[in-house]
Image (cartoon, rainbow, N blue to C red):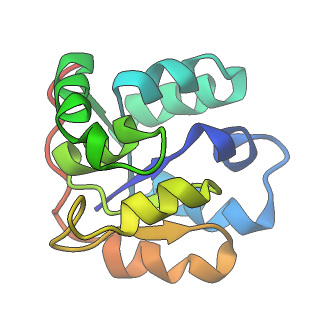
Amino acid sequence: MCLIVDTNLAGVVFGSPGQSDFRPIIDWLTRSGKLVVGGQLSGELERLNSVRRFIRALDQAGRLRRFSNAQTEAESLRIESNCRSNDAHIIALARISGARVLCSRDNALHRDFRNTRLISNPKGRIYQNAEHSRLLQLYGHTNACRRSMGG
């Protein structure tokens, strides 16, 4: 499965020196995991230098799934009235990609990501610290993540 990293934690997750809470994510991504980006999230992450370099390295290693702006925007518009957070683009990305693990510290987004009316089969899970590394093992080795549709 794939992982989505919200902009509010991307600098910490992919920054140097790495924090121990996010070391499992880095290890998983460099070994077998996939990072999902697309739409508004792509633009937000591209503005962060350390993140941009890491995303390029993941892309070169075949560990990145990038979804088109048009696809994520269309899904975001379709569901935004059902979201409590201002992050319908993240929920849309999870829905079109099949990603079910989110790394974020945004509580409103957490509620949306866990809302089975928005994300289900399987439901969304939240990674915030190293204690949640089991999520990468439980959800990290399935084929649920769909192929990217271009950038």
Instruction: Report the front residue among 30 and 52.
Output: 52
What x and y, as percent, mark residue 24? 61, 67
Q: Quadrant of residue 144?
A: bottom left
Question: In the image as oriented, which residue stretches furthest toward the right?
Answer: 17
Task: Identify which residue is drawn at 39% across, 30% down.
Answer: 59
Q: Is residue 14 above or below residue 51?
A: below
What x and y, as percent, mark residue 122? 21, 74
Instruction: Report the front residue among 7 and 74.
Output: 74
Task: Identify which residue is drawn at 59% across, 60% down.
Answer: 107
What x and y, as percent, mark residue 147? 14, 41
What quarter of the picture does the N terminus occupy? bottom left
Instruction: Report the front residue among 67 and 20.
Output: 67
Task: Identify which residue is drawn at 33% across, 47% down.
Answer: 91
Q: Quadrant of residue 117?
A: bottom left
Q: Quadrant of residue 120?
A: bottom left
Q: Is residue 103 visible?
A: no
Horizontal side of 128 relative to 70 (left or right) equals right
Question: In the image as oriented, which residue stretches furthest toward the front?
Answer: 81
What x and y, as percent, mark residue 136? 44, 72
Q: Is residue 130 above or below residue 83?
A: below
Horizontal side of 120 relative to 134 (left or right) equals left
Horizontal side of 109 relative to 117 (left or right) equals right
What quarter of the picture does the C terminus occupy? top left
Q: Is residue 146 visible?
A: yes
Instruction: Report the front residue among 124 and 98.
Output: 124
Number of labelled discs? 0
